[in-house]
Image: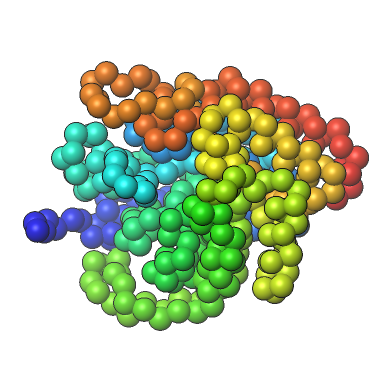
């Protein structure tokens, strides 16, 4: 085992500070998402972007394309960009830009933290809200102030450590169903994170400390399919909503169009997306939004030779290409705009 000291969170935050304008923007977008989840804002939440970020230049190009589209559709859609820097692995594989930013197994975590924060600061300056999955609890200390929507992933949804973390985070937090398809662990996670917790953790100065949280009232469910198949169909949604009701939780959820809901086929996300929008417009307005994996170019690629990687192609899950993404978002915007049921919500 080898131990190497990293900069403390406060050292990073002082060297890459968040401005008052950026902080206000992020606070406002968090409140907008809360309002959508609580039915106070009629817009549909769309969380879209690369499965993971490995090339900040390509991600920045994607971000600017998305910014223009978000402005055009903002009357009926609220668009948040995926900025996932940590990737849980079922077995082995690249764990994300935060841990291996140079794609060469050098594991320069200090540079990964800085690159991720620089990207998120740029996004805040461009008024693009960001979404991420929190995997290592320490990463929230470096990046959490720049995130508008957070997620506890399928592989960590049953983890007490992650439920404690979520209870103290300042943004709405989603809990995904398990890889097997189980919804109950996610619902238990939402309940658990809504309560206050006291636990051992690291403070912004890097010291082991007693952490006390107030609880997060903005937990919500994401259905992403499972080993037994998709769960975006009306019966699966109805079952999940009934479980939320029995648990005394608000009847609200998001649908992940990727992962097992699309059988990990990027173009199948279109079918899932269109089905969910149609269900929403047919008066299942407990659906508050969707997640879509999308990049500049379609598909994914293996990390075998970093010098031969294709530009704007995912290193992890396969993604829709930009043109398909833009067409899908415009389609959804048109459907929402035309729907009488949606207009009078």
Q: Left of 341 or right of it: where is 128?
A: left
User: On the image, which quarter does residue 204 sit in?
Assistant: bottom left
Residue shown at the point (27%, 18%) measured from the top left: 308
- Residue 242, given in percent of the width and then of the height, sits at 74, 65
Q: Is residue 213 above or below residue 259?
A: below
- Residue 279, given in percent of the width and then of the height, sits at 78, 43
Q: Left of 293 or right of it: where is 211?
A: left
- Residue 275, given in percent of the width and then of the height, sits at 73, 37
Residue shown at the point (71%, 53%) measured from the top left: 237
Q: Is residue 283 above or below residue 68?
A: below
Q: Left of 307 or right of it: where is 51?
A: right
Q: Is residue 35 above or below residue 204?
A: above
- Residue 69, given in percent of the width and then of the height, sits at 62, 28
Residue shown at the point (32%, 61%) measured from the top left: 138
Residue shown at the point (59%, 42%) measured from the top left: 261
In the depicted view, which residue is nearer to us: 153 or 214? 153
Q: Left of 84 or right of it: where is 244?
A: right
The count of marks equals 0
């Amino acid at each position: 085992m080898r131990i190497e000291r990293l900069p403390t969170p406060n050292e990073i935050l002082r060297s890459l500070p968040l401005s008052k304008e950026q902080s206000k923007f992020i606070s406002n977008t968090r409140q907008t998402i809360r309002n959508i989840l609580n039915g106070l804002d009629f817009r549909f939440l769309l969380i879209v972007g690369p499965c993971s970020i490995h090339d900040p230049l390509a991600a920045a190009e994607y971000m600017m394309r998305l910014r223009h589209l978000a402005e055009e559709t903002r009357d009926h859609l609220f668009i948040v960009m995926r900025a996932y820097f940590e990737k849980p692995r079922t077995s082995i594989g690249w764990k994300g830009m935060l841990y291996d930013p140079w794609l060469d197994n050098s594991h320069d975590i200090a540079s990964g933290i800085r690159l991720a924060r620089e990207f998120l600061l740029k996004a805040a300056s461009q008024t693009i809200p960001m979404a991420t999955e929190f995997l290592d609890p320490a990463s929230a200390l470096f990046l959490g102030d720049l995130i508008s929507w957070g997620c506890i992933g399928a592989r960590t949804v049953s983890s007490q450590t992650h439920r404690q973390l979520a209870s103290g985070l300042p943004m709405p937090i989603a809990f995904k169903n398990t890889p097997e398809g189980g919804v109950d662990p996610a619902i238990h996670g939402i309940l658990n994170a809504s309560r206050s917790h006291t636990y051992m953790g690291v403070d912004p100065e890097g010291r082991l400390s007693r952490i006390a949280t107030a609880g997060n009232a903005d937990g919500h469910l994401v259905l992403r399919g499972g080993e037994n198949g998709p769960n975006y169909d009306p019966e699966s949604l109805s079952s999940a909503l009934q479980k939320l009701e029995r648990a005394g939780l608000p009847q609200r959820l998001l649908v992940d169009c990727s992962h097992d809901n699309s059988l990990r086929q990027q173009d199948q996300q279109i079918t899932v997306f269109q089905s969910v929008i149609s269900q929403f417009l047919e008066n299942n307005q407990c659906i508050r939004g969707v997640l879509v994996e999308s990049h500049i170019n379609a598909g994914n690629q293996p990390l075998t030779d970093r010098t031969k990687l294709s530009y704007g192609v995912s290193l992890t899950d396969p993604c829709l290409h930009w043109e398909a993404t833009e067409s899908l978002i415009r389609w959804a915007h048109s459907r929402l705009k035309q729907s009488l049921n949606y207009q009078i919500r």
